[in-house]
Amino acid sequence: MTYFFNWYNFAMPIKRFLVLFLAFGISACAAFAPSSTPTPALPTSTPVPPTATPPPSVASVNGEYITVAEFQAELARYKLAQTSLGITVSEEEANKVVLEDMIAQVLLAQAAREEKFNLTESELQLRIDSLAESVGGAEALSAWQSAHGYDASSFQITLKRSAEAAWMRDKIIADTPTSVEQIHLRQILTYNESDARAALEQLNDGADFDELAALYDTITFGELGWVPRGYLLDARAEEAAFTLQVGAYSDIIPTDAGFHIFKVVERGEHPLSPDALLTVQELALRSWVAEQRAKSEIVLVP
């Protein structure tokens, strides 16, 4: 399971909201679902500047603190989510994943404020009231908050920051192009190296690539379709495929899936498939966070 950028949609039904809040915490970007965040407006307030005596924190991001309390609450939810999925993670890995995800969220939220996005107090309260009504009342929501490490104030902070970050996420992915440079790819895929060697020898002797591909895969006939950079899971396979000229085929490329021989059928700008678009959007988000992180002042508390 990838924890990076799994933001919940605040408009979703309360049961689903609570399940996802519990499972993925306060991060929100891999789903890439349209959000229900309001139209940006001029801010009516600004974040409280850091005080001379900062709160107990695990990190500060451009002066904005990630407190120990919210980190521990988020860490507990993350561990519980992993356990429910049958996944075992070490304490070190869990700490790293949660902290990096929270830093990314703060960076997104800060960027949203810079873009003049503002969730007003009344809009925030409407969200909380709707959640309370859906879950069975204010007492039921308060009980859930307490069970998961929140008080009323920290829950509001979490909701507001998540809404800000979700708005910025949507802005980033909205700017992602839907048509990019791609290659139209076919492959001969075998599950042992000797078959791959035999296929390559036949190709070198003049055999037709598409006919051989169909022999090894009677369902797709080796057709992979249009592929953008970043879409193939194996970096070596991607590099081999994208260096090919149109009509050329590769040497044998071993991956976890088997032994591949690629052929580029066409090359050029082409609309992204829905699945490839999600990949490109995630890459855009990761790149944005990496760039923003590099130019930000992030202080980790030992």
Image: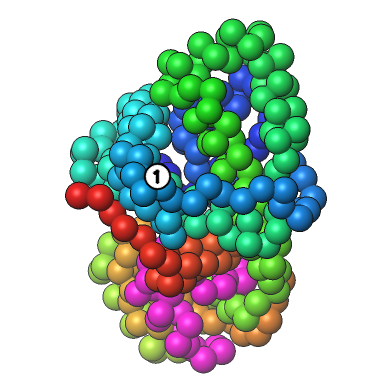
Q: Which residue is mark 1?
A: 66
* Position of 41 relative to 176 (above/below): above
Q: How many marks?
A: 1
Q: Is residue 89 visible?
A: yes
- Residue 39 sits inside the magenta stretch: no
* Position of 256 relative to 152 (above/below): below
Q: Quadrant of the N terminus?
A: top left
Towards the viewer: 75 or 182? 75
Towards the viewer: 101 or 141? 141
Q: Is residue 207 visible?
A: no
Range of residues picked out in magenta: 224-249
Towards the viewer: 234 or 172? 172
The residue shown at (39%, 89%) is 205
Query: In terms of image quadrants, where is residue 170?
Result: bottom right
The residue shown at (70%, 35%) is 121
Classed neighbour count for the residue bearing mark 1: other residues with Cα under 10 Å, few (<14), some (14–19), many (≥20) = many
- Residue 231 sits inside the magenta stretch: yes
Compared across the picture, whether 142 is left or right of 167 comes to: left
Residue 270: give x, y in percent of width and height: 70, 76
